[in-house]
Amino acid sequence: MSLEKIKKITYSFLNRKSGSTVIIFSIIVSLLIAIFAYFYIPKMAAESYTQGDEIKEKGIEEIVIPEEKIVVSHIETPEAVKAVYMSSWVAGTKSIRDKIILLAEETEVNAIVIDVKDYTGKISFTPKNGTLLAYGSSERRIADIDELIEELHSKNIYVIGRVAVFQDPHMTKTHPEYAVKTASNKDLVWKDDKGISWLDAGAEEVWEYSALIGEEAYARGFDEINYDYIRFPSDGNMRDIYFPYSEGKVKSEVMRGYFEFLKMRFALQEIPTSADLFGMVTTNKDDLGIGQLLEHGLANFNFVGPMVYPSHYPDGWNNFSNPADHPYDVIKLSMGPAITRAEAMGLTRDSLRPWIQDFNLGATYTAEMVRAQITALDDLGIDSWMIWDPSNTYTEGALKKETE
């Protein structure tokens, strides 16, 4: 009998009776209510509790709406990559980076090279890989890296992640055992003319570290991994220098070993890679004392980017008193031999994607001078290039409009 039914009986009875009979009946009703409360309410509560447990077990006690997550995607490498460089600081500053993105939207530029790790040794965003995170190398310069890449992809802009490898003053502090040392005191970290310390290119632990960075960048949406400073030091007191991991070894063989390591690591994952090499590797047959040979780069990376900045060639090179004044000639004379050497390996000129100059050094670079370098590449049949300006202020007049 339910409590509601007892109440109805009581109400009906009270409307018909009065006096002492009502009092007696009231006592009886009270007893019935007490009995009902004692025996039935706990049972109802238990059933309610049990049903609640069943709901929790089935995971339907509450509706959880997951946060909207960015789906990582990649853009296929364009047939002709036309890129500009963006530092990590600029990439993390929306008001400045938007100008470069707009440049890409309005001109022939279809790719942007962004620092993942620069010469300071700092990774420009917080890694998700626990092993990489444990190194403590990250600095949150690009707080919205995932959103930035998604935006670039939405505009069909190819995103290249640049990783500076062996020039790394952060790692030489946290892991001095991998650092290049002075020969006079092997406990002292060696520094170049700019006061920057280097990692020994023969340290395989550093190879692994650089590969982890590349894999992290690709996992976050970067379409290609570009490796820079993949060489031995070139400036500084070279008479007082000691390499704890590669002392006595042939530098070019050390670098080839590293290049082959990267190729094996990334080819299996089908991750496109590129390498930045000294500009003079295209015309020199030796390793320039830094371990770089053009053929070793071409054999192990999808693309090679010789840094053929006219200002970086010595006075008198090819009889130019100041090579910086001759952008067209320097590019044509430097990249022509590169094509010949690539073809001798069974490769095409498409594997070459040189860095060209848009900064004032040796000469004030006008729109005409920047364009002259691109014209030289066009005349050689090379249609991919990357423009370098450390200040990230590009000469728009040197670039073709999107509609042209």
Image (tube, helix red, strand yellow):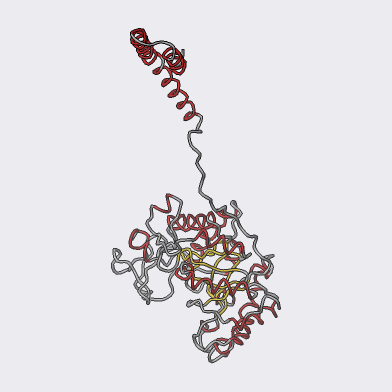
Q: Quadrant of residue 344?
A: bottom right
Give the image quarter of residue 222: bottom right
Of the pair 73 and 130, the residue shown nearer to us: 73
Q: Position of residue 35 (x, y in %)?
A: 37, 11
**Residue shown at 63% from the left, 75% from the top:** 106
The residue at the point 59 percent across, 56 percent down is 271
Count of numbered badges drawn on the protein: 0
Q: Residue 287, relative to residue 269: is it above or below?
A: below
Q: Nearer the viewer, residue 56 or 94?
A: 56
Location of residue 228 in the rendering, given as x and y in whole percent from the top left corner: 50, 67
Q: Is residue 179 left or right of residue 204?
A: left
Q: 73 or 118: which is nearer to us?
A: 73
- Residue toward you, 24 or 126: 24
Q: Is residue 98 above or below residue 30?
A: below
* Residue 40 horizontal/vertical position (percent): 41, 15
373 shown above or below 386: below
